[in-house]
Amino acid sequence: MPESFGPAFVGRSRPLLSYGLRFSESVLKHADGTFHASRIYVICSTSLANNTTCLDELKNTLGDEIAGVRVGMKPHSLWSEILQIVADARKCEADLIVTLGAGSLTDAAKTVSFALANDVLTPEELDTLCPTSPQRRDEIRPSRVPVVCIPTSLSGGEYSATAGATNDETGRKHSFSGALQGPALVILDPELSTTTPERVWLSTGVKAVDHCVEALCSLQSNDAADEDAKRGLAKLIPGLIKSKQNPKDLEARLACQLGARDAMSACSSGVPLGASHGIGHQLGPAGVSHGETSCILNPAVCKYNYKKGANVERQNTIIHILWEDPNAREVFQQQQLEKETADLGDLMDAIIRVLGLPRSLKDFGIGEDKLGGIAEHSLKDRWVQSNPAPLDKEGVLEILRMVL
């Protein structure tokens, strides 16, 4: 398959997108030809390093252009680990950062490049780069070292110019943006994605679906973003169902990857998302994986907003789109859902269940005693604040109790 290469999004020069080549071949081509890099720092997931030959393949392909390697990070991009990588990459004089693996590595790499540009050494200094920090510094320099992402999941962070990272001491996840630069290049390899555990692949696919749904549900969306989100759903829904039926279906996996790109084109264009993402940011530190936050929250948030009359017309548009897809329609009919009575939350619940994914907080040992703290942290999240139906603490608690 020949390489497809160019901007990932219409009208935006970055990130670039490459697919059609083996991932290692694409990294070598663009490290040399696009970035003129000679000191490459690789951040690789533990599972890929230990259970596959992918890291060895990348090392062999890049040879002495590799300046350093970090294997493994805990979920949710802990500040302590980010600062370890910052120190290592600075020592290596890295001029390109490459991630091989899923979402947390991506957010970490974006934060590392941002921290390097601003001479960050400590958690206190990292805090000064947070947009909401009382200690935010006056002069913040933009990221300089480009980041190349080779994603193995569908969470989509590789297309975003924001990064989430968790302060170990407080357990709160913070968002970095502004002068932070998103990845310069995204490399898609559907064959590589077959190394991803099924639950991770499918749950992050639901995260990408959630990007589409919350963009389409937003009261501040626009026609271009709506069209991107609709294209994303048209690829993701059948792609995920087919991936579940046959994990080796590379055509379906590439469709999912391109659908995740479309989803991020919608929500990275400035369209604010809603409470599924906002509350989900705080479920992460409580032990719920990145994609599974959407599996749990999306149907409940859809139902809450619909009940409040916040975005009924927009939800009805998505209901129509989902019923028109033959793969989704078969799922709904198997679940004995009726087109006239099933709301969007019901349809999303059916899709998530047929993919075999979790639907409640109890699956993660989260009970009533933890909800107050999650709700308090959630209220500070920008996407809780932009939810179509206004939310206070009691509103967030209502949503959380729907998924206990």
Image (cartoon, grey):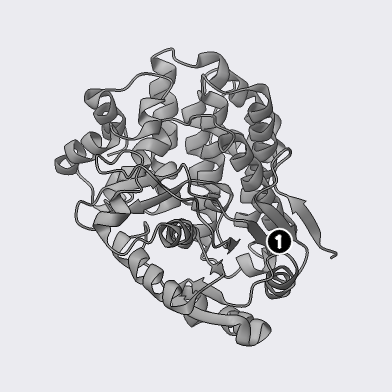
What quarter of the picture does the C terminus occupy? top left
Name the spot of residue 331 as percent of width and height, x first: 60, 39
Residue at the (36%, 53%) spot, across then down: 165
What quarter of the picture does the N terminus occupy? bottom right
Q: Residue furthest front?
A: 139
Residue 26 at least partly seen:
yes
Q: Identity of the amino acid at label 1?
A: Asp
Residue 360 at least partly seen:
no
**Along the line of sight, which residue is nearer the eye, 392 or 38?**
38
Decide: is 388 above or below 208. Answer: above
Residue under circle 1? 249
Decide: is 312 above or below 177. Answer: above
**Along the line of sight, which residue is nearer the eye, 145 or 265?**
145
Q: Residue furthest left?
A: 369
Name the spot of residue 25 as percent of width and height, x first: 73, 74
Name the spot of residue 73 as percent of width and height, x first: 39, 68
Position of 64 with respect to 112 (left or right) is right
**Along the line of sight, which residue is nearer the eye, 354 or 126?**
126
Secondary element at image label 1? loop
Position of 333 with respect to 130 (left or right) is right
Q: Residues within 10 Å of mark 1 (few under 14, many from 20)?
A: some
Circle count: 1
Residue at the (54%, 46%) spot, across then down: 160
Decide: is 235 above or below 148. Answer: above
Name the spot of residue 230 as percent of width and height, x first: 67, 32
Residue at the (64%, 38%) spot, across then down: 233
Give the quadrant of residue 150. Answer: bottom right
Residue at the (47%, 31%) spot, across then down: 273
Q: Residue furthest right?
A: 2
